[in-house]
Image: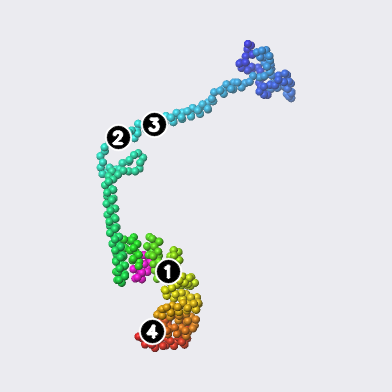
Amino acid sequence: MQKHNDIYRKENPLLPKRRRGRHASREEAAGAVFPASSSSTSRRERPPMPVGNVDGRTDTHYRPRSNRRRRKQQGLSWPNKLLFGGMAALLLGYVAVLAYSTIKNRNTPEAQPAVAVAEPVTEDTPATRVEEGDAALVDTKPSERVDALDREREAFIREAVTRWKDALSHVERSRTARERGADLTSVAERLEETLVNSPSLLDVQAELADVYVELKRYDDAYAMYVSILESNPQDYEVRLKLAQVLAGMQQHRAALAMAQWLLEADAFAEQPNYVAALALLQLGQVNEAITHLRRLVSLNRENLIYRNYLAVALMRLGQHEQAETVLRDVLAEDPSNSVVYYNLAVSYAQQENAQAAVDMLQSAAQQFGMPFVMAWFESRELDPIRDTPAFQALRDEALDTPAP
């Protein structure tokens, strides 16, 4: 085989380098003429030279030069080799550390099986852990400590029971003393001493507050009732007593608020309606007061106090005829009711009917005595007839009447 036909030889350096494409076309190999340039023909524009093949034929194609490049690219470049080498080193290091830690843990004393060793236990020996990682501590002498706690609780309960029984007995004696009319001041003092020993007993607080009410110590009673309600706000009876105490303290708005709270549970409860009616009358809200008073009269018509207050409310609204009807019905049922005489006289006086008012006052004087009726003459509600001749004559007669 000829040397120039060796397909494995390197490219002939005498051949022109390929510049216009991967392969020259057959037209160029056949002798196609390239367009001439303004200058002389360059090496780039020269037609390719024929190359002989093994069989003697000429080949106008160039031998590819990329074989050498492919052979060079078959192996990894040095940056890739460096990267893969680093990753392999890291992986081997991690495996080595993991193996070392595993072997070390197997050789540590904690990993060895526990051997029971009898150690001396003293009173100062601290509690030991049940197992590794467990936060619960075991007492070295649990039975003795449990027994001590049991004895302490038992002693406390015994003392508390004795104290509570004594306090309740004081409450019973206080109620008995109140029923018998004993000195309430001494009763209050004993209850105050009992309350010092048992400050949280509601029975003692309630009894002491009731004693304060009878002694008209409304401020102390108010504080005691409020303390009870702080502990038990559902106590209906204590709420009612607090409303009555507020009314006695002339705290009409507070009394009305407490009464309305009671009426939320029962709108037809008698005492809350009564407290609300009085508070509304004092606050000048007569129409609202009449609503409660009519409800009270329907609930308990036998109670003449409710009907008297209803008549007073009607008079304040100027409804004197209805008020007089209510008062005369009450007078027919109870002729000895002095409040009815007074209210009828006031009703006539507000209508400037002096003679009718004087006649009612004279009837009251015959029933209860002139000195008793004379206390009414200074009432401001009789001012409309004070300067009339009929009232002046009655007053002069009252002054001339000798004292009994």
Most distant residue in the top direction: 1
Q: Amino acid at mark 4?
A: Gly
Q: Position of residue 234 (x, y in %)?
A: 40, 61
Foreground disc of the pair 1, 4 = 1
Of residue 47 and residue 90, the one placed in the foreground of this image is: 90
- Identify the residue position indicated by label 2 in the image: 115
Foreground disc of the pair 2, 3 = 2
- Which corner quadrant holds the C terminus? bottom left
Q: Is residue 334 left or right of residue 72?
A: left
Foreground disc of the pair 4, 3 = 4
Residue 278 in view, yes or no: no
Q: Earlier in the sequence, mark 4 or mark 2?
A: 2
Q: Amino acid at mark 2?
A: Val
Q: Earlier in the sequence, mark 1 or mark 4?
A: 1
Q: CA distance from mark 1 to mark 4?
A: 35 Å
Q: CA distance from mark 1 to mark 3?
A: 86 Å
- Identify the residue position indicated by label 4 in the image: 369
